[in-house]
Image (cartoon, grey):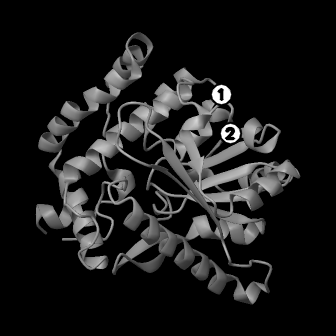
Amino acid sequence: MSEQEKESDVHWADEKEAISSNKPLKLLLFMFKTIPTFLVHAVCYPVTFFFLIFSPHAKRDALIYQKRLKEFSGGKVPRKISPYRQLLNFSLCVLEKMEGWLGKVNYNRIRYEDDDIEELLGLLREGKGAILLTSHLGNMELMRSLQDYNTQLCGREVPVVIIMDMNVSAQFTQTLKELNPNYSMNVVEASNIGPDSMIYLEEEAEKGALIVIAGDRTSAQNRDKVIRKSFLGKEADFPYGVFLIPALMKIPLYYMFGMRSHMSIFKPKYNVHIEKSLVDFNCPRSEREARISDCCGEFVSKLEKFCMMYPYQWYNFFNFWKEE
């Protein structure tokens, strides 16, 4: 087996963390505290250029995605194949996460689209919970970090529980904990999902919490438990367990995408899209597997839609389609 073939079989969770030391993150934190934010953003441009040169796998994965999107869209999107632009968006995304945890992102920089946001807010105002299914397209962690996000929209403090793999991005996670000691208090470790954690999630939902989970990366532990769906014209694996959770909890499910509306180092703005799932899990158990597959298919169609709208904000830098 060639080295390229071996690399094509590497699971995303086995990829080395892009930042293996927290020193660069500490430097960014120092810069955020000492110089204007737009200057920190400006540093991303040359840094991304060097990353493009010295990280060939990231450039390769960006090219695979953009070429697949170009073919899927009939040559319309993206207008220009540019791995640099995609990596630059990712660099800015990392900065935005840190900005949010430092309280440097104002609520007025976020625009909510006129979709199903009011229905979701109505549920939250009534003290009911819901599931938000997100992805690594755009930046959803930024929305969680906004200090006035809950009260301005809902009139109450809405608990937020995130299901994620804490080990894969250990350095970044540890730095966020230092920025905000409460960071890990409402994070459920994805590798430990079981009966106890499901009981916890249901209890939080009864308190009116938002349960947030990404649906575009297969489980690091149950790698063979996947749903195969056509994504951008080619079969890809999606995590079965993610779509099992709403089937078991039977609470409203919404797809949520937080996207940068335009490239700017001066107070960039963000669009948030929220669309309700049409899949009804209040069904006989014999129909549950078919509904889970339908839910995954619905999510994939949303993912394709927003990839078309924001082609450079895809941050899955691994062999998503197992290309050789």
Q: Between residues 81 and 233, which one lies in front from this camera angle? A: 81
Residue shown at 43%/37% (left/top)? 268
User: What residue type is disc 2 on?
Assistant: Asn
Q: Can residue 225 be seen in this view?
A: no
Quadrant position of residue 6: bottom left
Q: Which residue lies furthest to the top in this view?
A: 34
User: What residue type is disc 1 on?
Assistant: Asn
Can you give x and y, in whole percent of width and height, for residue 117 in the image?
69, 57
Q: Is residue 152 above or below residue 65?
A: above
Q: In this view, does 4 lie to the left or right of 143?
A: left
- Estimate the spatial distance between the alpha carbons at disc 1 and disc 2, rounded to whole Å: 8 Å
Q: Is mark 2 on a helix, strand or loop?
A: helix
Q: Across the whole image, how many numbered discs are drawn on residues? A: 2
Quadrant position of residue 172: top left
* Mark 1, residue position: 182
Residue shown at 74%/69% (left/top)? 248
Q: In this view, does 72 lie above or below 87?
A: below
Q: Badges 1 and 2: C-beta atoms under 8 Å apart?
A: yes
Q: Is mark 1 on a helix, strand or loop?
A: loop
Q: Which corner quadrant holds the C terminus?
A: bottom left
Q: In this view, does 94 lie to the left or right of 9?
A: right
Q: Which corner quadrant holds the N terminus?
A: bottom left
Q: Between residues 112 and 98, which one lies in front from this camera angle? A: 112
